[in-house]
Image (cartoon, helix red, strand yellow):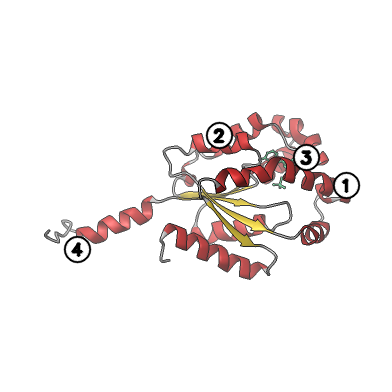
Amino acid sequence: MENLSVAGTGLSNARVVRQTLLTEVPLNLVFFGPPGAGKGTQADRFAERHGIPKISTGDMLRKAVAEGTRVGVLVRETLQAGALVGDDLIISLVAERLEEPDTMNGFVLDGFPRTIPQAAALDAMLADRGGVRVIALVVHADEVIRRLATRGREDDDAYVIKERLAVYSRETEPVLEFYRRRNAVTILDGNRPMAEVSVAIEAAVGEREGRTA
Ligand code: AMP
C-alpha cells in the first residue's frame, strides 16, 4: 500500500494513525489500597505529571463538610466514625464529576470505588470511555498504622483507624477481586519509599498502555 501523506501536515498516514491511537486511549485510572497506603500522594503526583485531574472522593466529602453544604451535613458523622457513606450518594457525586470535560483524556480516582456496587456503577459510567485500569498498592498492616498515626487527620485517631481498616477488608478488598478477574489490576509493593513507588507506577502504566513517554 502507498504511504500517503496527510494533506498539508507533512506526516505520513501511519504516523497520524499512531498518534491518534495514542491520544485517544484515555488514562482512566483507579489508585487502590488501604487507608495509609500512600495512594492519595501517588495519585496527586501522577495526575500532575500527566495533566489529568485527580478525583478523591474523600477530599470531595471533606470539602462538603467544611463548607457545610447539604451533602456535607449528611455525611459528617459517617466520616467521623470511619464508616462508608451510602453508595447512591457517592456514585452520583462521581458521575457528576466524570461529566466534566477535564476528565475526557483520563483521570485518577482515589478512594473510589470502595464497594462492588460502586465498581459496577463506574463500569456503566465508562462503558463508552475505555474502562479503567487499577493500580493497587499493597502495604503491610503495621506500616499502614504507622503512617496513619503520623498523618493527623480528624478520622486518624486509633479507634477510627481500626474501624476504617475493618471496613476496608470487609467492603473494599472484594473490589480488587472484581477487577482482577478481568485482568485490569497491577499490584505494586507500596512499602517502598514514595519515589520508588512513583517510578513503579509510571512503569506499570506505560507498559499497559504501550506508551513511550
Ligand atoms: P479517604 O480520604 O478516601 O480515606 O475517605 C475519607 C472518608 O470519606 C472515608 O472514611 C469514608 O467515610 C468517606 N468516603 C470516601 N470515599 C468513599 C467511597 N467511595 N464510598 C463511601 N465512603 C467514602
Place of residue 78 in the rendered image (x, y in percent of width and height, measured from the top left): 78, 36
Mark 4 residue element: loop
Residue visible at 68% across and 43% down in the picture: 172
Q: Report the side of 80 relative to 7 (left or right).
A: right
Query: What is the distance, in whole Å, between disc 3 and disc 1 at their CAs?
Result: 13 Å
Give the residue type at disc 3. Leu
Dot placed on the residue nearer the N-terminal end, 1 or 4: 4
Q: Which residue is mark 2?
A: 121
The Cα–Cα distance between marks 1 and 2, rounded to whole angstroms, is 31 Å
Name the quarter showing ligand 1.
Answer: top right
Q: With 104 as the anchor, is 66 left or right in this view?
A: right
Q: Position of residue 76 (x, y in %)?
A: 78, 36
Q: CA distance from mark 4 to mark 3?
A: 56 Å
Residue 34 position, x and y percent, is 71, 51
Q: Which residue carries the number 4 mark?
A: 10
Tag 3 secondary structure? helix
The residue identified by callout 1 is 159
Q: Earlier in the sequence, mark 3 or mark 2?
A: 3
